[in-house]
Image (spheres, grey):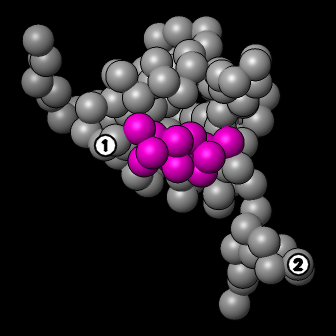
Amino acid sequence: MSSDRDTTGEQAPADLAFDALADPVRRQILSVLSETDELSAGGLAERITTVGRTAVSTHLRVLRVAGLVTERRSGRYRYYAIDSRGAAADVIALLRSLFQGSLRDARSAAERHDSAGTPREDVG
């Protein structure tokens, strides 16, 4: 049986990222961050109205530990941005490869179906 944890008992970076992405509030935070270069924790809390400020901070910590966002401190403020070089890049690459393979399979099946002489309905 394979394990999702390394020999030290810690989760692999991609596993942490997918666990972090499983939460709708964290996906909402990432969506807000995708619209801007960087945003303070307070600015994020103002835009995320489904939970309180403390919960937003907790979600930001999970996203940071998962390698999906970076944190920059300036005085008493913390600014967050999507970490495009961290686990986010790994997640995107994995999803891209999974979906591209599925799309190739669907295209091949459609082409086989067409070559068998079965008419296709026009879409749109």
Q: Quadrant of residue 85?
A: top right
Q: Element under label 2?
A: loop
Residue bearing mark 1: 51
Task: State the image coordinates of residue 121 (x, y, percent, origin top left).
Answer: 11, 24
| Magenta-tinted stretch | 53-64
As drawn, 18 above or below 12: above
> Hey, what amino acid is under mark 2?
Thr
Task: Tell which of 49 and 9 is nearer to you.
Answer: 49
The reply, left or right, for residue 67 in relation to residue 60 is: right
Task: Tell which of 100 and 96 is nearer to you.
Answer: 96
Residue bearing mark 2: 8
Q: Is residue 91 at all visible to an observer of this figure?
A: no
Crowding at dot 2, Cα within 10 Å, few <14 / some 14-19 / many 20+, comes out as: few
Locate the C terminus and report the quarter of the image it occupies: top left
Task: State the image coordinates of residue 13 (x, y, percent, origin top left).
Answer: 74, 54
Residue at 75%, 19% (x, y): give it.
Answer: 75
The earlier-in-sequence mark between 2 and 1 is 2
As drawn, 14 above or below 51: below
Q: Quadrant of residue 3?
A: bottom right
Q: Is residue 44 at all visible to an observer of this figure?
A: yes
Q: Element under label 1?
A: loop
Identity of the residue furthest to the front in this view: 76
